[in-house]
Amino acid sequence: MFLEAFNLILFNSEVPSLSTILTWPLRHPLATIVIAFLCALLATVGVSRIHADGSLQAMFSRNDPSAEALSRVLNDFGAVDELLVLASIPGEANASPADTARLEQFGDRLVTAIDHDPKSAPLTDGAFDKPDDDSTAYFQHVVAPAAVYYLDDASFAAARRRLTKPQMQAQIQQDQTMLEAPGAAGGLAKALMRDPLRLRDFLGGFTSRMQSQQPFSTKRGSVRFISADGRNLLVFVRGKKPPGDLEFCKQLTAAVKDVAARVNSDHFDLNYGGSYAIAAVSATVIRSDMIASVTGSVLLLQLLFILAYRSPFKLFALSFGPIALGLLLGFGGYSMVQKGLSPMTAVLGGVLAGMAIDYAIQYLSMYESQRDAGQTARRAAATSAVNITPAAFGAWATSVVGFVAIGVSQVNALRDFALLGTLGLTGAFLAKMALMPLLLMLTDRRKSPASPRSTFRFSLTPLLRWTGRHARLCIGFSVIIFLAAIALLAVLPGDLLPLESDLTIMHPRPNSAIDAQNLIARRFGMHDWLLVDLRAKTPGELVELAHRVDQRLTTSAAKQAGVAGSFGLGTLLPDPAVTAPRDVELRQIDPARVVADFRSVIEDSAFNPDAPEIRDNEKLLNAVLTTPPPTIDKLIPYRRLAEMILPRSAFAPGAKITEAITLVFINGSTDSRAARDRAVLGIRAALTGEDGAIVTGLPVISYDAEQTVRHDLPRLSLVALAIVLLYLLVHFRNFAEALLSILPTAFSLVVLLAAMRLAGQRVNMVNLVAAPLLIGIDVDYGIFLVALARLKKVRQDAPAAVIARISPVCHAVVMCAAATIIGYGSLMWTSVPAVRSLGFAVAVGIGACLFSVLFLVVPIFLRLSRGSVDLESS
């Protein structure tokens, strides 16, 4: 009862209060224009604060620990803040030593130039083409003196035995034997002098593990990041700000490109990858896509008006002006909640223009039909404002339902898309309701009440008559198409909706930065990698957690998942679980006695006890036995190394470090869904129960995104469908009319699914919104047609009367569908594949809906009309 009363009050044009509200702008034109102008100014201020946002965080799901972890890593860790410069020798010939030397010289010039260039230096934390000095220094000054804490139990036991005097004597005797062998070179003598007790042998396992944990392979014997074939050099440039700052990314990438071009006197091929380069490409393309989408949509809409109306430029200006204001209001409202425009939301301007112009077309059709019937401009405007508003409100409400349903999604970008779509359509609806009848009235200069000729360039009456004469044929053909689509979906092998697992489809194409990234991976044999985000209460517990994670990643199950190695705190610091019992054992050893025994053994040998190398060994022995195990505090001074696994906050004075990352290297590529799923599920299973360790990284987010699509698509569609059905039942209070209104929607969704399968389209996080959007958009056309035709009147009228009544409506529906197809079709020339797929899906769905309106619903109406369906006499 409440819903019926609300519907009666809202839509009954006989209620004075509603008519008064809807015609208020016609009675107060100046006040209406002033209010619109002030609203536009306020919205402009808000829109000026919106900026492009090409970060991947927008595509992350809510309440997803892996997404939250990766977001923290992208924002807080310097490990991902890198610009990669790939310098390659042109051609395919084998690289000579001279060629490789030229690459190394180029690397020296580039690193020096970047560090000293006035544009690039303030933006970077340095550039390097070889392992940084911090890594070497850390192993010399921290790891080597505390080497006993890095040994496994067997190696430690062997090293402890080696430090007894009998074992020292045996080892020195073995060294002397090796030196006396024929052909023993001076290099061997120097090596034995540096380490006569061969203590480095016990670090072999640790050294091998370190070498296996390199993320890429380089030329043997080279200290530079030179590829194995000697043809490529990789230079890393670290930025001072996170890659989420798109303007910074553009500045840094441009500055480094300028420097590289200036020092590239050898004319090497240069490519730029890494997070900064990818973000810089996205920042540029988001802006150009937004401009192209809106411009293309407006131009095509103007062309549509030229084809459909006389005085097309005037009518288009009258129609599009309120839309532009409404969209400005929508974007202004959006700026109060969100400041960033993702690739998905950036192109909504053109889409909403195509959708919102439907309201203008409906008002225009009603106004012109009233003028043709002899009413004055004021009366025609008032009649249009009162009579079209219920149907326009229904069209707005059902379209918004699609966006509201999308807002239920767990993906941030989809919620932003839904919010902006809802606000934009609402602004357009309100602006159109307030201004369209007023503008039509004020600009109508026709002296005669009746127009001398119709504003429309074409009429659908002939088509409707033909449809009436062949109603059975049209209905049958439509049913055949519907059944054929169902059969196609049932027969084609594979999933009903193949899902897209590649998150890079959210990036523009072509994309030089992503191409460079792939090129670097191929030429340097880079491992794919995942991250484990580690969080603990104390620094000590954080190191313990890192070691437990490393141990789990060495299990057979982890190896089967593709784990090739890992790098993190567990690599650089000893395990606290080992250091405590090892301290107890070391306290049982007298360092002074060990050093004295070593000196005694050396004095009895052929080695010179006063040689500097021997003195260094004595110092090393004392350090090994007295140096405490290193902790995180020892790592912090070696910033270049530490920032690979620690957040920026760790380097603040007095910081309590409770978060770190472990890089997990994967054998092979995770581009295929099978390999990706095996790695993600296997590593997650290996770390099950390890609180504080969250597996993350792009392959993980890609996997989770696919699961989100699987979960959200049916849910969003069902939510939209349920809300629309409820609204239709309230609106019509007639089940048959509600069913007829939604029939084109069902037809279009089935045809769309078949078309996507035939076209090889995959469902991703963008085009999954096509279904709920189509449910909201397609039902508009059914509402307009059924609302003005009404079954009760159809059964009472002759076919000719039905055609006369629905012809203007069908004309408006054709125009509305064409305009919406233009709006979404404008997405098909954007550069982001996922956004293009949305344009394809919605355009096909609306085209199918329009077909079903004209050749299924209209024939049904005509078959239900009173009398013969032979319309030749009419």
Image: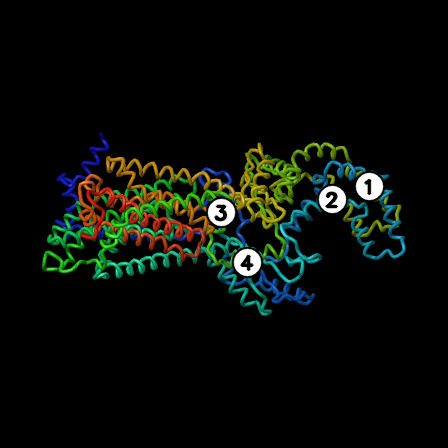
Of badges 1 and 4, nearer the viewer stands 4
User: Callout 2, which amino acid?
Assistant: Leu
Of badges 1 and 2, nearer the viewer stands 2
Residue located beneath label 3 in the image: 500
Cα separation, mark 3 vs mark 2, equals 46 Å
**Where's residue 248, x and y in %?**
46, 55
Of badges 3 and 1, nearer the viewer stands 3
Of the numbered discs 3 and 4, the one sitting upstream in the chain is 3
Q: Nearer the viewer, residue 291 or 119?
A: 291
Residue 596 is labelled as 1
Callout 1: SS = helix
User: Callout 4, which amino acid?
Assistant: Ala
User: Callout 3, which amino acid?
Assistant: Glu
Q: Are marks 4 and 2 in contact (CB under 8 Å)?
A: no
Residue located beneath label 2 in the image: 203
Of badges 3 and 2, nearer the viewer stands 3
User: Callout 1, which amino acid?
Assistant: Ala
Residue located beneath label 4 in the image: 516
Number of other residues with Cα within 10 Å of mark 2, as a class: few under 14, some 14 to 19, many 20 or more:
many
Of badges 4 and 2, nearer the viewer stands 4
Callout 3: SS = loop
